[in-house]
Each structure stands twice: as C-alpha cells, then as structure tokens.
Amino acid sequence: MMNLIKRNLLSNDETLRFKTIFDINARLKSLEKAQLRIFIEQLINFDIASSLCDFLAVTDSNILRSTLSSLGIISGSKLFYTKNVATQAIIQMVQNCYLMTRQPTKEQNILAKMAFTLIAIINRANQFNIDLKTICSIHQLLEFIINFNIEHSADFTHILAALNLYAVVLLKIDDFENENIFSLIVKLQQDILTAAHNIIQHNIDNTINNYQIFYLNIMKPIVAICYAGMKLCENDDLSLNKSPDSTNKGDDFHGNRLTPIIHIICKTMLHCVIPNAKMPNDYYNENNDREMLIYLVNCLSSLYRRPDVDLNEFSFHLVEQGYLKYLFRFIDCREDFWTCICDCIANIITDLSQIYLALDKWSDGRQGFRRFIKSALLKFGNQREVNCATTDACLFILYFHFLFTRDLEIIDTIKALSLMTRIINISAENLPEIPILQMILFLFATTALEGPTEHLEEEFPYALLKTVEILNVVGLENCYTHHPILPCFILQNSVFPLKMRHDVVKLWLKLEENTCHLVSPGGMQILINCLLNIIQTSAEDLIVERAMNELSRILRDSNDSPSLIEQQTTQFMWENLPQVFTNFMNNDSSENNIYNYLKMLNRLSNLNVSILSAIRCSNSLITVLNCEKTINGDIKTLLVKQMSKMLNVDLIAKDGRVVSVYTNNYKLLNELRANAFSREHDNLSAACYKCLADILLSQKQLSIKVYILNTH
C-alpha cells in the first residue's frame, strides 16, 4: 500500500497527486492511536513524508493546508526528526513564506498555519530531547518570522502566529551567535512586542474575552518573549566578561548594544504585561499558567538585577496591580518555583522599602534586608516555619499591598499572623530592626482604624501599651511612616502622651499641610492644640508656617461665628500666653515662634476671654517689653496690639485692673509714647498710638485716675 501511495504522490497527474495528499490527511485524522503510530512510521520509512514536504512549495492554498495538517500530525513521531523530515519541512516553509509574502495577494491564513505547524514541530522536538539546531538553523527560523512583516500587518491571526512562533524560537536561543542573529532579534523584539502591545490596547473593552486565546495565546508568549530576551541579555553580559578582549569593548558600548532590547522589554512589561498577566481565579490552570508565571517572575528578577532599569517604576506598578498578594498565593507550589517567587517578592519589597521605610537603618544594609526577606519567605513556604522572621516577612507583603491598594481583606490575614501577639512579645531590651517597627506600627494602626470593632481582640489594650513603650524607647520619629493612618491612630488614642501627639503632627507637617482629615470632627480640638504647640515651640520655620496656615484654615472653615472651635482655641492660647513669653525670655523658643503665636492670637476674637487671663497675660507682657532683650519691631508691634486686646477685655468686664497695671508702669508708658511719635516704624508707631488712646479711654470709662507721663 505504501508503494502505491508513493507512486501516486509522484505521478505526473496533478489531480491524482492532490487527491493522494487529501487521502493521506484524511487517514491521519481518522486512525486510532496505535494504528496512527504505525501509519506515520510507514510514511516516514517509505520517504512519503519527505515527498509531502515538496508540496509546501505549491501555491494552491487547499493543498498547502492539507500538507501542513499532515506534517503537523506526523511530527508527533521521533522518526520525523531523526530521518531529517523536520529539516526538509522547515526549509520548504521558510522558502515558501519568503515567496508568498512578496506576492500581490498574501495568504495570511496559510502563513499563520505554517507558523503554528513550526511551533508544533519545535515543541515536539523538545519533548524528544532533540536539539533544535540539529534539525534547522536558528537564522532560518528568524528569517521566516521576519518575512511576516509584522510591523505592517493588522491581521490578528497573522500577528498571533508570529507572536507564538517567535516566543517558541527565542526560548531555544542561548546567546547571540553572531551579529546577523543579534540584528534579527533586535528587530523582531521591537516589531512583535509593539504589535502585541497594540493588540492588548485594542482589547481594553475585553473584545478578546476567551481565556484560552487571551492568556495562553497572547499573554503567555508576550511574557515568554520578555523573559527570553532578558535571559539573552544576561548571557551576553556573561560572555562579554569572559571574553579575552572584553576590556577593549567598554561597558558603554555593551550597554548601548543591548539598550533597544531592554527598552522594549521594559515598556512591554510596564504597559502590557503587568496590567494583564494576573490570571483570574476562575481561569487558573496550574500547568499552563504556572509556566507563564515562571517566565514572569524570572523576567522581573532579571530586570531587578540590571543597573540600567528604573526599578521604582516596576515596583510601583506591580504593587498597585496587587502582585505581592497574587504571588504570595502560590506558597504551596513546588520548592524551585517558590524560590523564584521569593526572589521576585524580595526584590519588590526591598526596592519599595528604600523609599517608604528607613532601610538605611537596617543593620547589614539593603542586600542584608533582601536576604532576610527571601530567606524568611522560603522557610515559611517550604517548611511552614513560624517565627518572628517569617511572620515579619509575610507582614511586609501585607504592608506594601495595603499601602498601594487599600485592600481591607488583609485585616483577616494580619489577624491570622497574630500581629498583636508579635507586638506584645517585643522586648524593649532587644528591639527589632527599625523598618520592622515601622511596618508593625502601621499595620497595628490599620487594624485598629480600618478593621471592624469586633475584630479588636482582648490583646489590643496590651498591644497598645507596648506600642507606647516601644515608641518611648525608640522615638516616634524613627518609627514614623508618612500616611494618614498613623497620625489618625495616635491622635485618636488618649493612651499616647501629649508630646507624642504633638510630634506626630509635626512629622506630618514636614511633608505636607492638610491635617483636617487626620481627626474626626469631635477630635478637632486635639489637632488645634497640637498645631498651637508647634507654632509655640518648633524651631523649623516651614513647619511653623504650615501649622499657621492649617490653624487659620480650620478657624476659617468652622461653621459658627464665632465658632465653638474658635472660642476654645482663643481660650487655650490666652491661657498659654504667659508660658510663650517665658520661653521667649529664656531663649527656649525663637522669634519666629512668638511672632507667629501672637500673629494668630491677634486674629482671634477676645469676646470670651476671662478677666483673670487678661490680668495674668498683662503682667507677663510688661515683663517682656521691659526686659533688656532686643525685640524686633514686628514682634513689638504684635505685643502692643495684644495690650490693646487686654484693655478691651478689661473694659468689657468693667474691671480696671489691666489698665491700672499699665498706668502704674511709667517705663512702659514712656516707651509707648516715644514709639507712638517715632517715624522709624510706622506699624509700631500706629499700634502704640492706638494703645495710648485705649488706655485713656479705659481710664475715662472706668473712672481711673489719670497719671501725667514723665516728659524726661
């Protein structure tokens, strides 16, 4: 029978030849497994399979489809490779592809069929442990893909075929054998990844909603191409370092050579892979999707090893898209795969910790921190070892995941990891590293503020007290992370000392102004007191200015006129004014502190100020004005204006003790008169003139004896 098939296949009768091709294909598709294996071996041994390869050069599309289908089935036999049929088939397909792409009408579907047949041949060669280079030239395969002219194609099937074939071929290449192959790869990397990116962009509305097509036929080859490209670049780096003349090539030359490949991989990973490579739980297939994930994590690890890549951008995108939590769910996978994932997670966490945590305070530096994360995750995953290190490594994952996504589902995971027990067991004599304390404090605040009330365990009060103890030892500034949750937590819990509350607002104002969202409406007075303390004591002008702006905004935006908040603020400021004067006299605060404090106080109404506060402040104020310390004109102007406010309180109360304090101090009155008629400082002159007028008015209204000012 085989002789008859071969004779018909070689017949001069074209109709008979074509009929024989269709018959072979039909029989290959219809036979059972055992019979199929025998039939395929006969086709190969009688050189019929080799003769079929010659029909790849015809132009009839039906014959080509049937021939490609038959060769695809026959490639399932190892004889297909050992008898060189695979080599013949590949050579014919490369030649025909070159001719077809130069015809006016291109058979795009036939080209795609050729590509998928080549993919089947290459994959099966791998299953039979046959080196691809023994059956074809890598250069031939790359030329085949180049002939697709992907940069000018808009056909989805055409692009899909080239994408998948290029991924399979690139994964088989270990190095850039020569400059020709290097040039082909640079061009294909650019053209194919750009075309793939366009497919993804056009699929924003999920028109490709079939899981099989989108994840396995589009995303998987894209990720594979990125991974294989990075592997080639790393191998090229190694070969350069081993080369005897590597010192003559120069690092700049080498870096520039790889830049186009690295650039398109980075662009594809950031804008195409990271937003789309996470498989939904409903679609997850362990075998297929794990392979894609291996490509992904290995590609990311390669990128993190390169000094010429902006790692921050990768880290931000990965965490924003939820990859830390996503990767962590593969904890039950086999050991070698979990090792790759741990390496990737450690890179992401280390990079972000450099920005968001005090990683410079880690005892053995950045690389030591990275080793700590990777080692702890490996122990947690492979051995299910639970200790402080493994718990902390897992908590770092949750910390950054929440920081970027605000995913409240982590609350239950934090509870499962016994965060509060971890805090309670911290010894003040043997404290963890500073970044660990920063992370733990933030997550503790998160569970307290964001979790449901019933979530707070019996351990919460003890964990809270331990937190205060730790902060007293380490210092809040060393454990602070700039996020609203931390100041909210400290301001809303009265167990934290007043100074710690002041400090947390001060730390917040170092980086930004808006503070109103740090407290609930009922806790606004706590915030105001903190702002006033900053105005009174902070040595940093920027922080004082921001505190002033915040306090002004809070008072301006309050609903009542005068509001309860303003009344409470005024009362607090008047009661605290003598201490402000004392600090100024003792050089415990700067001119900027007293200036801003008085400036704010002068803006406020004094309708609800008690006469006792006014009397006490008057005595302190006179002490400041009469002291030997040099006071600049702006501060002196505010002090005199404050005198007028105190006189106003005295007059409203019809008391007279404030005006008596002033009129009994001849030195003060003489200085007021001298400054009132001086032209050196217009604002001070006006304030003194008004104050003298207020004194006279108070004396008249309250029937107090008028003293004659000393004219000397």
Image (tube, grey):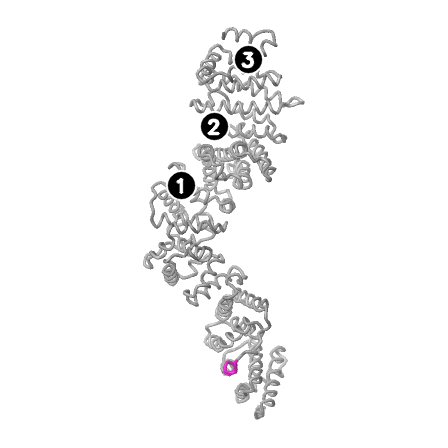
Identify which residue, 6 or 707, lies in the foreground.
6
Mark 3 sits on what residue?
23
Position of 66 with respect to 332 (left or right) is right
Mark 3 near mark 2, Cβ–Cβ under 8 Å? no
Q: Residues within 10 Å of mark 3 (few under 14, many from 20)?
A: some
Quadrant assignment, res 25: top right
Position of 284 with respect to 461 (left or right) is right
- Residue extending farthest front: 454
First to last magenta residue range: 610-615
Q: Amino acid at mark 3?
A: Asp
Disc 1, SS: loop
Q: Where is residue 165 drawn, in percent x and y?
A: 53, 27
Mark 2 sits on what residue?
172
Q: Amino acid at mark 2?
A: Lys
Residue at position x 59%, y 66% in the image: 557
Q: Where is residue 375 drawn, in percent x and y?
A: 37, 44
Q: Where is residue 164 drawn, in percent x and y?
A: 53, 29
Identify which residue, 361 or 300, lies in the foreground.
300
